[in-house]
Image (cartoon, helix red, strand yellow):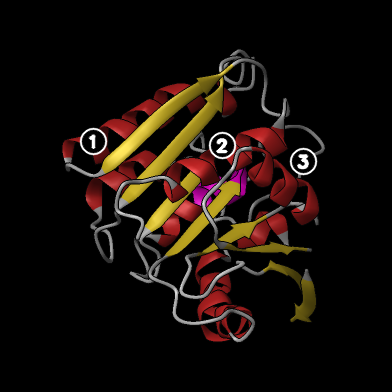
Amino acid sequence: MITFNIEGKEIAVFPAGDGDRPVIYLNSFMPNGKQIHKAMRDLNCPDCTLAVISHLEWDNDMAPWDIPPISRGDTPCTGGADDYLRLMEDEIMPAVEKEVNGTPPWRGVAGYSLAGLFAVYSLYHTDIFLRAASMSGSFWFPGIVEYIKSHEMAGRPDCIYFSLGDKECRTNNQYLKCVQENTETIYSCYSDLGINTTFVLNPGNHYREAAGRTAAGLAWILNDTRVK
């Protein structure tokens, strides 16, 4: 594992064993790269470089636009996703790829919760990612379904993975209760476009087996038949 910091973000790089392997960029609420990497090994994931980015300004970096607090005592989201994506492309990704051998055949973007929302949102602002995985993505986020229906992606991705806990929509919170309906709508939008996609409904709430769910999503995009 190789670690470094860029503008306060901590990046942990787990290099592939061989050269010319894919690179997956995983934005994470906490520095849990070792746990995720072990879970991927347990699933016998194809060889890749995993770059886990943490110490994010979570409610800013992962949010596409401003929204008020969604519950009492919560903080607002301030839409800094576009700025953070530029930081990824201009500084973080070049630094990561100095540590890999050869040329990646493709790059993926992934995340859990708000980072799962960011992974999909980023496809509309850059064509650098050919695969995406969104685990328990925050698709309750106001306006995101309308945004996806009214905008075109920057490029056509190979595949997109979605998963959600089957209890996540069972809440009295007026924001969160639509998360499964919205995720299924977004999944259907991409299926209708002919993009290879899947939606997995896991048992449990938002927090259950997050590392395992994340690894499963990464395994799915790595095992897509277009991997060389």
Corner quadrant of residue 203: top right
| Residue at 45 percent of width and 50 percent of height | 222
Q: Mark 2: which amino acid?
A: Ala
Q: Mark 3: which amino acid?
A: Asp
Q: Mark 1: which amino acid?
A: Ser
| Left or right position of 6 against 226 | right
Q: Nearer the viewer, mark 2 or mark 3?
A: 2
Q: CA distance from mark 1 to mark 2?
A: 20 Å
Above or below, comparing residue 70 to residue 52 in the picture? above
The image position of residue 41, as x and y in percent, is: 67, 46
Q: Which label was assigned to residue 119?
A: none
Q: Which residue bears the numbered disc 3?
A: 74
Q: Quadrant of the C terminus?
A: bottom left
Q: Are marks 3 and 1 in contact (CB under 8 Å)?
A: no
| Left or right position of 26 against 151 | right
Q: CA distance from mark 2 to mark 3?
A: 30 Å
Q: Nearer the viewer, mark 1 or mark 2?
A: 2
The first of marks 2 and 3 along the sequence is 3
Corner quadrant of residue 31: bottom right
One can see residue 200 in this view: yes
Q: Which residue bears the numbered disc 1?
A: 191
What kind of element bears circle 3?
loop
Q: Nearer the viewer, mark 3 or mark 1?
A: 1
101 in the magenta segment: no
The image position of residue 29, as x and y in percent, is: 74, 51
What kind of element bears circle 1?
helix
The image position of residue 99, as x and y in percent, is: 64, 82
Q: Which residue bears the numbered disc 2?
A: 216
Q: CA distance from mark 3 to mark 1?
A: 34 Å
